[in-house]
Image (cartoon, rainbow, N blue to C red):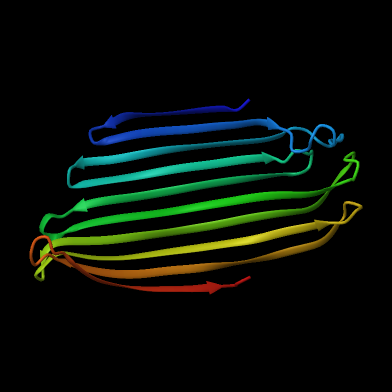
Amino acid sequence: DAKHLSGAGGIPLAPGLTAMVSGDYLDGGGYRMIAAGNAGTVDHASEISSRNGTARLEYAPSQRLSAFLSGNFYNDNRDLGTALSHTNRDDRRLTFGADVDAEQLGTLTLRGWNGVMKEDQFATAVAADRSTERLTSWQHLPTHDWGASLQWARTGILGLQTLLAGADVRKISGNVEEADYDATGAVSANIQSGGSQLLSGTSVQGIIAPIDPLRIEIGGRYDHWGNDDGF
């Protein structure tokens, strides 16, 4: 039977400072991937489970200033119905942000993040009578990404209703580590590859409203991306 548990809560720590936590757990239960009449000694009920949690701090001393810091983790495990075939994934992420209203100088919105993820996959071969199983390959997939964005907005400037400008950057790197196994269980091949990609961009947008309900938006964006140590 499937099981699902979740919860959330928060508590004020000081004036303007709040801590919040939330979590979720799911157990999908077990189910047969091979019909009972065809199953062998290597087969059992497959299982899927996942869990995630978030802890967050929010600071808002006034209506013109707010900031947050948040950490999140996610993990799932998938048993594919035999002793050796399964996958698992682990994802951890830190995010932060701030919003500032500087009145006549405009508003600033800052966001940033840093995350790591890894996944392992195990592939197998099963005998025709499903009495034995052997490992054929293992893949390890680690990735890392970080980024940030900043946006500024101001009303009533240069004859515009609103003027917006922003910039963002993101870098993603990852690898594939794979081992193949022969019929004796010995490693027959090792494969490694990887690379990284850097993306960045800037944008500007102006909004005018000469007559109601006419609204005109004019904007542009420049993007740049590059790959290093490609696959």
Residue 214 lies left or right of residue 221; in this view the side is left
Could you say which is closer to the camera, residue 89 or residue 13? 89
Residue displayed at 53% across by 42% down: 74
* Figure label count: 0
Compared to residue 100, the image places residue 72 above or below, namely above
Query: Is 141 situated left or right of 157 in this image?
Result: right
Image quadrant holding the C terminus, namely bottom right
The quarter of the displayed image where residue 13 is located: top left
Residue in view at x 24 percent, y 41 percent: 60
Of 16 and 201, which appears nearest the observer? 201
159 displayed left or right of 98:
left
What is the quadrant of the N terminus in the image?
top right
Residue that appears at 77% across and 57% down: 179
Q: Quadrant of residue 187?
A: bottom right
In-front residue for pair 23/218:
218
The location of residue 59, given as percent across then percent down, is 27, 41
**Where does residue 36 sit, x and y in percent of width and height?**
81, 32
Q: x, y (%) of residue 41? A: 87, 34
In the rendered image, residue 58, in percent from the top left (x then y), is placed at 31, 40
Q: Nearer the viewer, residue 73 or 158?
A: 158
Q: Along the horizontal axis of the image, is 41 left or right of 53?
A: right
Residue at position x 51%, y 62% from top?
A: 172
